[in-house]
Amino acid sequence: MAVKVLKYSILSLILSVVIPSYSQTAKDAVSYLQLINEQYQDIEKQMWDYTSTMAHSKSAKRVEKKRIDLINEVRKSIISVSNMRGFDNDYSLRDSVVSFLTLEFNVLNNDFSKIVDLEEVAEESYDLMEAFLLAQEKANEKLEIASEIMENQYKAFASKYGVNLVSGQNKISIKLKRSSEVLKYYNQVYLIFFKAFKQELYLMDALKRNDINAIEQNRNALITVSDEGIASLGVLRHFEGDNSINAACNKMLAFYKSEAESKIPILADFLLLAEEYEKMTKKMEAKGRMSPTNEEIKNYNDVLNKYNKGVNRFNETNNALNSKRNSNINLWNNSVGLFMERHIPSR
């Protein structure tokens, strides 16, 4: 199985406020802003916990629990901010914050609930996997747009009441932004990997069914998908000089291409030979007491010899493919795990 990492990001709006001099009104405005900012601190911690868990945990239940914890934290903040008074009878900022938190709650509770459902079927096809990742991107876009609107409300409020704002990012904000960049890059590589990974599964299914036409069709498709993937990786910039998952994916695609071009024909030829041998055996058995001719015996023995040799070659080829496939899959999975450890801290 391929390693799957969910993608989630959110713009952090924790603001550092610096005021060289201010009136009493400005001082009160700063306190008001700081009171609102406090509502984000626990949300940000929960957000990081959720993001880190998604990047490093293979337990779907654990990831889902973190999402529920985050939803509950946002719900608490909505109640808290809604109960705040307006500043000097000005409710614009408070209401904007409530609107943003409500949207965030809806995205986490509704959009991401649908995303969780999509995840359950995402591996069934490339199109479903692409839809799964696209749904996450769309959910993030909603939050980013709402964040920009709310940040403008912050600035408007500060300007109105004489507060100088200096926007800054705390450690968690930086981690969240970093994680978003890492996962966005990974998803690009993962889709390239998954498309070929899935295509090979179709090919293996055709082999299992001894469907020669489907084997040839899926073999050619795997060559095409592998070539396209290798070309896409060639123009994809490395992540801050880290080429590990790009290289692991490239090696996987090279295996798929080689398998489809030079090894699958060996397996397919044997299936044809096995079919011929089975037909000839049944024909010989059908003769019953009638003695086969010398020519029939010679032809049967020739096919039998080819079949015996073919069995050995088929097994050797198949075993070698299984070994190389497992090796490359392990390399991919290990590379992804190490990539996440290097670029997304677990704490």
Image: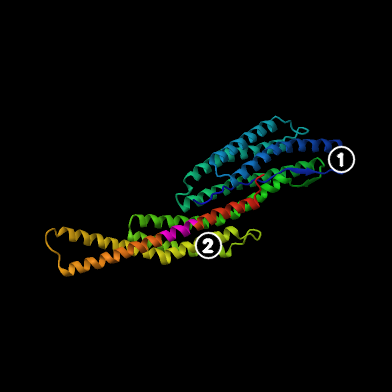
Whichever of callouts 1 and 2 sits on the residue coming sooner in the sequence is 1
Q: The disc labelled 1 sits on which kind of residue?
A: Tyr
Query: Would you name the residue on which mark 2 appears?
Result: 251
Secondary structure at badge 2 equals helix
Q: The disc labelled 2 sits on which kind of residue?
A: Lys
Residue 156 found in image quarter = top right
Any part of residue 300 in sight:
yes
Q: Which one is nearer the viewer's eye here, 78 or 216?
A: 216
Q: Which one is nearer the viewer's eye here, 126 or 197?
A: 197
Query: Would you name the residue on which mark 1 appears?
Result: 22
Q: Nearer the viewer, mark 1 or mark 2?
A: 2
Estimate the x, y position of residue 174 in percent, counting from the top left.
70, 48
Q: Are marks 1 and 2 in contact (CB under 8 Å)?
A: no
Residue 203 found in image quarter = bottom left
> How many other residues sit within 10 Å of disc 1, few (<14), some (14-19) or many (≥20)?
some
Estimate the x, y position of residue 135 in percent, counting from the top left.
54, 47
Magenta-colored segment: predominant secondary structure? helix
Q: Which residues are magenta?
A: 319-326
Q: Which one is nearer the viewer's eye here, 146 or 63?
A: 63
Residue at x-position 11% and y-position 61%: 290
Is residue 161 part of the magenta span, yes or no?
Answer: no
Q: In the picture provided, is 199 more to the left or to the right than 340? A: left
